[in-house]
Image (spheres, rainbow, N blue to C red):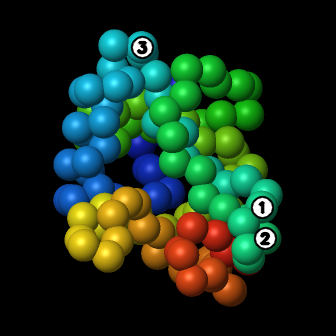
Amino acid sequence: MVDTQVPVQFTPGALQELQRLYTELAQKDQSFLRIGVKGGGCSGMSYLLAFDQETSDSDKHYTVDGIPVVMNKAHVMYVMGMEVDWENGLNNRGFSFNNPNASETCGCGQSFSA
């Protein structure tokens, strides 16, 4: 079952880049965009944003701008209200995460502690 309320928001730039990646890489493989967290990084946890072909019973299913998205139910509390942006500048290129649940973040913006 697909849930309509996605706990993560995406900026227009992030949606554009995700659409490009999905069209070029993931759509033909029937992959899902996996959003979540994993242990590690300089602040204790790091963000997970990648295309995946496997799901589990602990995943919640969403659709974002036509892209199928999965997220482990246990990860929702760490990313609820987070905004994902795409930066394409000279000094910084890639996805960035603005997480209101993070009590501490590292300089690279890819890891946090809650």
Quadrant of the snapshot with the C terminus: bottom right
Query: Which residue appears farthest toward the front when viewing the image?
Result: 90
Which one is nearer the viewer's eye here, 8 or 43? 43
- When asked about the image quadrant of residue 58, the answer is top right
Please name the residue that numbered disc 2 is placed on: 44
Dot 3 alpha-carbon crowd within 10 angstroms: few under 14, some 14 to 19, many 20 or more: few
**Mark 1 belongs to which amino acid?**
Gly
Task: Confirm whether residue 14 shows in the render.
Answer: yes
Please name the residue that numbered disc 3 is placed on: 29
Count of numbered circles on the image: 3
Residue 40 marker = 1
Q: In terms of secondary structure, where does tag 3 sit?
A: helix
- When asked about the image quadrant of residue 85, the answer is bottom left
37 versus 27 height, above or below: below
1 or 3: tag closer to the N-terminus: 3
- List x then y, in percent, for residue 8: 46, 58
**Mark 2 belongs to which amino acid?**
Gly
